[in-house]
Image (cartoon, rainbow, N blue to C red):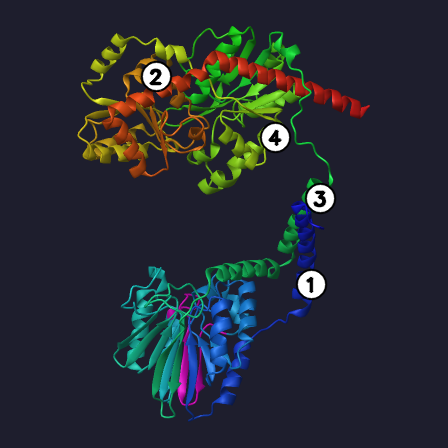
Amino acid sequence: MMFRNPLKLLFYLSLLVVILLVGYKAYLNLFTEDFEGEHTEQVEQIHHRIQAGEPFSFAVVGNINNSVGIFEDRIIPELNGSGLDFLVSAGNAVSGGGEDKYRALYGTLSHLDIPYLLTFGAHEYEDFGSFRFYDHFGPHFFSLQVGNSQLIFLDSTGKTPWRWQIRWLNDLLAQDTGQARILFIGHPPLHPDENAPFDQQDDYLAPPEFRDALLKAISEHDVDRVFSSNLSLFSEEVVGNTTFVTTGGAGGLVLNDDTSFYHYVRVNVTADGEVSHSLQRLEVGQHPILKRLESLWFFIHSLFYTGYLNFLLIVALFSAITIKLYGAIFIGKDYYPDYDLDPAPWLEKPMRVAMFTNNYLPFIGGVPISIERLRRGLEALGDKLLVVAPRYKGQPEAEAHVLRVPSLLAMGEKREFRLANIFLARIRKRVRAFKPDIIHLHHPFWLGSLGLFVARTLKIPAIYTYHTRLEHYAHFVPLPGMLFRNLISHALIKRFANKCDGVIVPTYSTEEYLRMIGVKTPTFVQPTGIEYQKFQDVRQEDIEQLRNQLGLQDEKVFISVSRLSNEKNIDFMIEAIATLRRETEVPFRFLMIGDGHQKDRLQKKIDDLDLQKHVTLAGAVPPEDMAVWYRMGDAFLFASKSETQGMVILEAMAAGLPVVAVRSSGIEDVVRHGFNGFKTPEKQNQWRAQVRKLLEDDELRGTLASQALEFAKDYSVEQFARDVRTIYATTLAMFAKKQKSSGRDSE
């Protein structure tokens, strides 16, 4: 079989796409005709078909929206076989005013066997489409005599001043001797009795002065029919002697219900000027898949009609894909880890490790606490550490192991996020004098970037710990949230991680995420350690003293530990607690430990919900006191989705607390559902049900508590430091082997 390798098939498909793109561009430029002033030709055909004093009939359609599946495939064949004399679009024949949309419409209308006229509507005006309409079809407002009837087309988009149009209309109708008067205007002057789907105020004729003047002129001059589009329905309303018809079912989005459906309107005008109309309904709609394919086709069409730049970009993209696939298919690679590594030489001697972090103690957070525990663990094993971190008020005076860097900028209400001055030469000088064997980076930017630069300058390996899901911190970044969340954050992590010599991740689900975004650097799964024994050494009298201090009596106590920030999803928990208090008779208190820029807003929410007796924002607690707070609790609640591990969850388990958490990458590997806690989707009713279960079922809570305690034993700080030290040694061995290999290659 020729294509047993799927990548080979993709390669040849990409190559074929490049060839087809070039061929299609050539076809568009060499074989498609230009068109201009089409209404002139269409009016001539209408006059040739219909003589003065003769009856005639025509179709009115609205919201064609460049539809192929409905208008071109379904409506046009009916019109061609219906005996109608011509077609009128009441507006929105195109889905947008781009050149591609007008050319696509021209191709669709070429299938008609009858002439046509277009009303200048909202979509024709979009994307600078007014000049295209004028060039390709004709003026934005005009009139013509057909038989003994006057057909009048107005511009409702605002392109033409409405006062000028009203003056022109009154003069035209005052001199008209025809027996029927039919007017077309894209925006409906009246609101339909039915609820129009998806309608907005700007879908109707505006400004009010234009609407009032038009209705007055229509009434004074006995206009028979007024046709509009712009709404995805069929509606008719009689005001005085005039029937107002809104038609919007010729191909655009409809709901396929009694109000919104695919249709067109047949209009008959007798020789003596009697006007009647009938609804022609299509009973079936377009399949959603075909609708998507149609939209995709017009998107592709648009990229090529607007010039050579898009064409060159698309060809370059597919050429790059082809080259990439060629490298993936025809160039051999070894994806297995290098098992021929000996970390022993580095494990047998003390190491010198320089760490770079954007935050550190006394700032309280998961990353600073993790770094501090690792530092103490490594120093206990005989290693030397230098931590490069921002300067804070209230930091310890004697810190031989820390290089504090003054800040250029402090952000956040409490100035908790600091932008260190990475341009100071003394940083590089101090690190060089320290003579590190390896550099450990804890953030993928700023001080982390400086650390990577220093590692490359000193020709030593750099290892990066992926602590934080950056996409959940979009609200801190002065960029569009979706842009940062869906593109920049992932690209930043991928680029930084691939520049490092090794990446440490706390969970297997986090490792999977890095692989999915394209990280190729060797990855080591290593959970952060906790001070397990510290939670066992808490005295009961300290717990009772804290309960008395907080005014707790017989309540069950829920604990949560988190920075008070948007990404921690604290509103979710507060709202769930507000409902829970009405569902249970068991008294409880929810203690939220932590500080942050959202504190005042969250306190106001607690006050507004009258939750002062159930929810307490306890503020920041010193790390040395945290064990007592944990041990005071009965269960641990968590809803953050921004964690990579959720170290506070392991700490809670070390204190014997079962956990209720929202499913996320940092939770999935730690919380075992029904064993040491519960994890639910981000749905308040499900999360609240598990909280209530722990609140009311003492036996279940006790079972899960003992199992949580047992689970946490495997995450001691001492083991954490030993495992990270082995990772350092392995990375040093890989780096040395790579250096040796590149040295041989350069000889």
Q: Earlier in the sequence, mark 1 or mark 2?
A: 1
Q: Secondary structure at mark 1?
A: helix
Front residue of this view, candidates 210 and 71:
71
Q: Earlier in the sequence, mark 4 or mark 3?
A: 3
Instruction: Give the labeled residue for mark 2.
Output: 655
- In the picture, the disc for residue 26 is 1
Q: CA distance from mark 4 to mark 1?
A: 41 Å
Horizontal arrangement in the rendering, residue 397 relative to residue 204 (left or right): right
Q: Quadrant of the C terminus?
A: top right
Instruction: Give the labeled residue for mark 3.
Output: 326
Quarter of the image for residue 158 reads bottom left
Q: Badge 4, how many Cα within 10 Å: few under 14, some, many 20+?
A: some
* 719 to 681, vertically: above or below: above
- Residue at 66% x, 61% y is 25
Q: Percent x, y for residue 512?
A: 53, 33
Give yes or no for residue 398 being in the magenta stretch: no
Instruction: Give the labeled residue for mark 4.
Output: 498
Magenta segment boundaries in residue numbering: 139-162
